[in-house]
Image (spheres, rainbow, N blue to C red):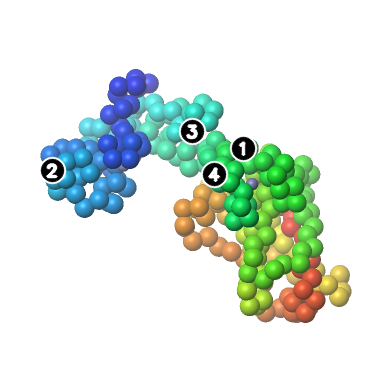
């Protein structure tokens, strides 16, 4: 059932104005508060009375039955679904607003995931790679400044990825990760390989194959798995010459 505006406003948290997703918590006087605000505050943010252990099961049930628009409706997303379905969708909605990943380099752009690639291509052309082939060699020969990040926004298979790579400040390891800007389910479809080439002998290569990680997890501070190259012959040569030649290949299962 599609809820009207008045009913939908009953789901707005009085403290942060966001949608209250279950569990919908209450104070001893009966004010409903979203779970994050409930956890954050010692007292009810509406009336300052103590918090109770009660939940508003009536409202939670309505939440499961009414249709909600995606929170990115104003950005152009047309998705509509029951409360929990919409919440799931919002986890990977391509209309999600994010900061430019090159923000540390003083870019103040914010926009949707679907506009990120075009922004990068226009304003940071050296950090954008558009790949339409099945196998994507991202051939990079970079003279890293130890401790600093190298980031590339990749468009491939009509999806968006963010490759991040850095050399430790004490020059002891190279770390990298390929973040996927889509859903958890789709993330399993992609994998990538990074090959490091011995600068003195191009036939000597270290090849490491990994799964993509989710940008959403990275942004929410969930620990994500980075790949590391350190104690290795090729790596030692790379360090000696400071010639970081590597090739990234992105593939779909
Ligand atoms: Zn709230
Ligand atoms: Zn209250
Ligand atoms: Zn959406
Ligand atoms: Zn930017």
Residue marked by disc 2:
28
Q: Residue at x 70, y 65 (%)?
A: 208
Question: Badge 3: few (under 14), some or many (20 or more) residues near its Cα, within 10 Å?
Answer: some
Q: Between disc 1 and disc 3, whose residue precedes?
A: 3
Q: Is mark 3 within 8 Å of ligand 3?
A: yes
Secondary structure of the residue carrying numbered label 3? loop
| Mark 3 → mark 2, Cα distance in angstroms | 33 Å
| Mark 1 → mark 3, Cα distance in angstroms | 12 Å
Image position, residue 18 (x, y; %):
36, 37
Secondary structure of the residue carrying numbered label 2? loop
Q: Which mark is residue 72?
A: 3
Q: Which mark is residue 114?
A: 1
| Mark 4 → mark 3, Cα distance in angstroms | 12 Å
Do labels 1 and 2 touch, CB within 8 Å?
Answer: no
Q: Residue at x 57, y 39 (%)?
A: 111
Q: Between disc 4 and disc 3, whose residue precedes?
A: 3
Q: Which mark is residue 98?
A: 4
Q: Is mark 2 within 8 Å of ligand 2?
A: yes
Q: Between disc 3 and disc 2, whose residue precedes?
A: 2
Do labels 1 and 3 touch, CB within 8 Å?
Answer: no
| Mark 2 → mark 4, Cα distance in angstroms | 38 Å
Q: Residue at x 51, y 49 (%)?
A: 216
Residue 84 in view (yes/no): yes
Secondary structure of the residue carrying numbered label 4? strand
Secondary structure of the residue carrying numbered label 1? helix
Image position, residue 175 (x, y; %):
63, 67
Q: Which mark is residue 205?
A: none
Q: Which residue is at the front of the view, 134 or 123?
A: 123
| Mark 1 → mark 2, Cα distance in angstroms | 44 Å
Q: Is mark 1 within 8 Å of ligand 3?
A: no
Image position, residue 53 (x, y; %):
17, 48
Q: Which residue is at the front of the view, 102 or 52?
A: 102
């Amino acid at each position: 059932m599609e809820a009207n505006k008045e009913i939908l406003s009953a789901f707005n948290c009085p403290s942060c104005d966001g949608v209250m997703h279950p569990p919908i918590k209450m104070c001893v006087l009966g004010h409903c508060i979203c779970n994050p605000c409930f956890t954050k505050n010692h007292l009810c943010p509406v009336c300052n009375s103590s918090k109770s252990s009660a939940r508003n099961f009536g409202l939670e049930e309505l939440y499961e039955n009414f249709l909600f628009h995606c929170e990115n409706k104003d950005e152009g997303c047309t998705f509509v679904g029951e409360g929990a379905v919409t919440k799931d969708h919002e986890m990977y909605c391509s209309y999600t607003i994010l900061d430019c990943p090159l923000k540390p380099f003083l870019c103040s752009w914010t926009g949707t995931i679907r506009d990120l690639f075009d922004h990068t291509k226009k304003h940071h052309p050296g950090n954008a790679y558009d790949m339409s082939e099945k196998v994507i060699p991202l051939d990079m020969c970079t003279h890293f400044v130890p401790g600093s990040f190298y980031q590339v926004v990749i468009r491939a298979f009509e999806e968006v990825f963010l490759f991040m790579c850095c050399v430790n400040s004490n020059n002891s390891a190279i770390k990298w990760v390929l973040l996927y800007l889509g859903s958890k389910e789709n993330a399993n479809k992609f994998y990538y390989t990074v090959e490091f080439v011995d600068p003195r002998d191009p036939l000597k290569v270290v090849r490491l194959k990994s799964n993509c990680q989710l940008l959403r997890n990275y942004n929410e501070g969930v620990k994500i798995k980075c790949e590391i190259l350190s104690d290795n012959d090729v790596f030692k040569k790379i360090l000696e010459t400071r010639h970081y030649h590597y090739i990234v290949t992105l593939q779909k299962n």
